[in-house]
Amino acid sequence: MRSGNGSGGQQRSFIEDARRRQIIASAVEVISEVGYGNASLALIAKHAGVSKGVISYHFDGKDDLMTQLVIQLYFAGGEFMAPRIGRAVGPRAQLLTYLESNLDFIAANRNYVAAMTDVVVNLREEDGSLKFASVDGEREIIAPLLEMLREGKRVGDFGDFDATLMAESIRDVIDGVAGRVVRDPEFDIAAYSAHVCRVFDVATRKGRSDD
């Protein structure tokens, strides 16, 4: 993306950022309507009310556009969750807020999450491997959660469990909801959120019963 210096450059940068977001939003809608495979740049441009040339100015082809679609959703999720987690006091409250805010974000962005899921399971590198299926990427995603769990164990808020396995289990639940949204538009995320918060609240407590 090109940008200039000074106030004029800042204004152009703001306008260009807004245009990129508009194009990504149109890509989300087109993917939701016709699927990843049929979401051509021509259809996305038509939905956005721009020419394909405008898309080419902001993105280096369809793969770049789809990559930025996924990245933008992750950033938006972080911006949504961080203030809520930051207001929670103590590791246990932070853990439950992490879960709840993740699922609230999915509930508020069903179409976007469904489109992103379609991209993630289809977008590939030049060698044919999935672009968003690296082990390093997964580690980066669970790193804040893992730190939260380890801190909770350190200060005595949590019981004895494998922090890595617990973090992976929590992420699997969250990612599973993203997939369920695709399959079942009527899925009650709020009820499920309350359920999984209770499950992981019990699972992380000290001296929990096995019966």
Image (tube, rainbow, N blue to C red):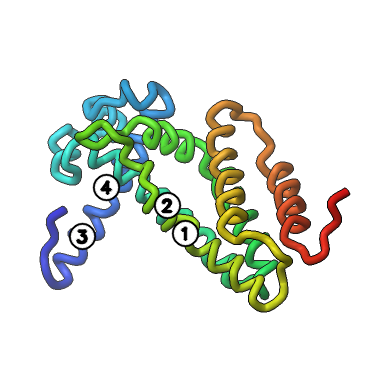
Circles 2 and 4 in contact, beta carbons < 8 Å? no
Query: Is 111 above or below relative to 11?
Result: above
Q: Residues within 10 Å of mark 4 (few under 14, many from 20)?
A: many
Mark closest to the chain's N terminus, 2 or 4: 4
Query: Pointer 3: what residue?
Result: 13
Q: Is residue 130 left or right of residue 55?
A: right
Disc 2/disc 4 C-alpha distance (Å):
16 Å
Please state which amino acid type lies under the numbered disc 3. Answer: Ser
Mark closest to the chain's N terminus, 3 or 4: 3
Nearer the viewer's eye, disc 2 or disc 3?
Answer: 2
Q: Position of residue 35 (x, y in %)?
A: 39, 24
Query: Is 192 above or below relative to 15?
Result: above
User: Which element carries disc 3, helix, strand or loop?
Assistant: helix
Q: Position of residue 173 (x, y in %)?
A: 61, 44
Disc 1/disc 3 C-alpha distance (Å):
22 Å
Disc 1/disc 2 C-alpha distance (Å):
6 Å
Tell me the number on the disc at residue 78. Answer: 1
Q: Is residue 201 left or right of residue 151?
A: right
Disc 2/disc 3 C-alpha distance (Å):
21 Å
Query: Pointer 4: what residue?
Result: 20
Circles 1 and 2 in contact, beta carbons < 8 Å? yes
Query: Pointer 2: what residue?
Result: 74
Please state which amino acid type lies under the numbered disc 1. Answer: Gly
Query: Which residue is painted at 26% across and 47% down in the image?
Result: 19
Q: Residues within 10 Å of mark 3 (few under 14, many from 20)?
A: some
Mark closest to the chain's N terminus, 1 or 3: 3
Mark closest to the chain's N terminus, 2 or 3: 3
Q: Residues within 10 Å of mark 1 (few under 14, many from 20)?
A: some
Q: Nearer the viewer, residue 153 or 93?
A: 153
